[in-house]
């Protein structure tokens, strides 16, 4: 019951946390942190000397474009760069081009493994991995189409985590273990690559009410850690009744269809 109440509060009653996000941008700047996108940071760590005191902002746009635009407006106000990863269901090319024009990054939050498994009602991880050649081709088609419409190459991507991935114990990131696929698409970095993550002192993700952050608040990390990655999702920063209801209904429908 407590879990349900927390979910209802997070989805429908939680006050906006955007002032908190803006305060974080200001605090990080005051503490001397460069605030970068994943693409910028990946390029920087290949140089000598590698940068210190950086806060890398990664936004996974699972849903709620309205709040994503508000996060972007705050970053633009304070001269902060970030990476925005869009699912097929949240693609907005006008918004994505504005992100790129501001010096930030817009790219793909891919989920072909989960999508394929649900579409074909595959319920065993081994069955899904056996279809990886087909799934990789699906990824390539989606990736290329997005890049063409965006009008610029995408060099980093980020795997989306779906309930189907957790049930199957197959993550979307497994697709990009194929170097040939990366070369074909021009992908230089996946946001979960070990070679990227090892350069961070702490990797922080936002969480639903009442936890908000894990493993530590970014406010507490500033000054204690030099290289910080912060993963955020718009839904954790402001409630959007219509969007939350839509996402909950889609999730319920997908569960029912997958298991029938």
Image (cartoon, grey):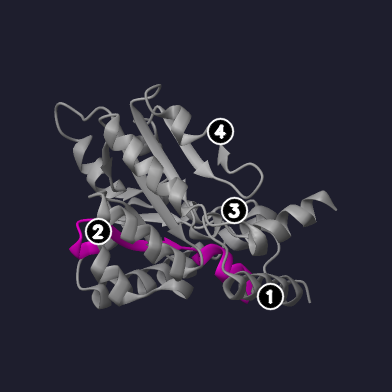
Label 1, label 4: how far apart the Cα atoms are: 30 Å
Q: Is residue 224 above or below residue 55?
A: above
Q: Which residue is mark 4?
A: 215
Q: Residue at x 28, y 33 (%)?
A: 30
Label 4, label 3: how far apart the Cα atoms are: 24 Å
Q: Which percent across, then down, holds residue 42?
A: 26, 42
Q: Which residue is mark 1?
A: 249
Assign a secondary structure to mark 2.
loop
**Residue 102 at least partly seen:** yes
Point out the stretch of residues depicted in magenta: 100-119
Q: Residue at x 42, y 63 (%)?
A: 68
Q: Nearer the viewer, mark 2 or mark 4?
A: 4
Marking on residue 186? 2
Sequence order check, earlier mark of 4 and 3: 3
Evaluate if marks 2 and 4 touch, with contact meaning CB atoms under 8 Å apart: no
Residue 228: quarter of image: top left
Marking on residue 170? 3
In the displayed structure, does residue 165 sit left or right of residue 149?
Answer: right
Q: Which percent across, then down, holds residue 3?
A: 78, 51
Evaluate if marks 1 and 4 touch, with contact meaning CB atoms under 8 Å apart: no
Spot the residue most to the left: 48
The crowd level at tag 1 (other Cα within 10 Å; few <14, some 14-19, many 20+) is few
Q: Which percent across, then down, holds residue 47?
A: 15, 33
């Amino acid at each position: 019951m407590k879990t349900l109440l927390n979910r209802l509060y997070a989805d429908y009653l939680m006050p906006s946390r955007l002032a908190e996000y803006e305060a974080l941008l200001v605090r990080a700047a005051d503490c001397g942190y460069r605030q970068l996108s994943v693409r910028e940071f990946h390029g920087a760590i290949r140089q000598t000397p590698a940068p210190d005191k950086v806060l890398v902002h990664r936004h996974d746009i699972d849903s709620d474009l309205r709040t994503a635009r508000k996060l972007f407006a705050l970053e633009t106000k304070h001269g902060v760069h970030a990476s925005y990863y869009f699912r097929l269901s949240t693609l907005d090319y006008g918004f994505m081009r504005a992100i790129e024009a501001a010096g930030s990054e817009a790219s793909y939050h891919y989920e072909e493994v989960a999508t394929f498994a649900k579409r074909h009602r595959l319920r065993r991880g081994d069955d899904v991995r056996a279809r990886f050649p087909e799934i990789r081709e699906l990824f390539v088609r989606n990736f290329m189409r997005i890049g063409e419409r965006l009008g610029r190459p995408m060099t980093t991507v980020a795997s989306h985590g779906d309930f189907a991935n957790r049930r199957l114990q197959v993550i979307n990131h497994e697709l990009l273990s194929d170097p040939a696929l990366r070369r074909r698409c021009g992908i230089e970095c996946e946001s979960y690559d070990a070679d990227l993550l090892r350069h961070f002192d702490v990797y922080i993700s936002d969480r639903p009410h009442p936890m908000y952050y894990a493993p530590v608040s970014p406010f507490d990390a500033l000054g204690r850690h030099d290289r910080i990655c912060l993963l955020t999702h718009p839904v954790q920063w402001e409630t959007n009744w219509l969007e939350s209801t839509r996402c909950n209904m889609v999730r319920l429908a997908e569960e029912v269809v997958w298991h029938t």
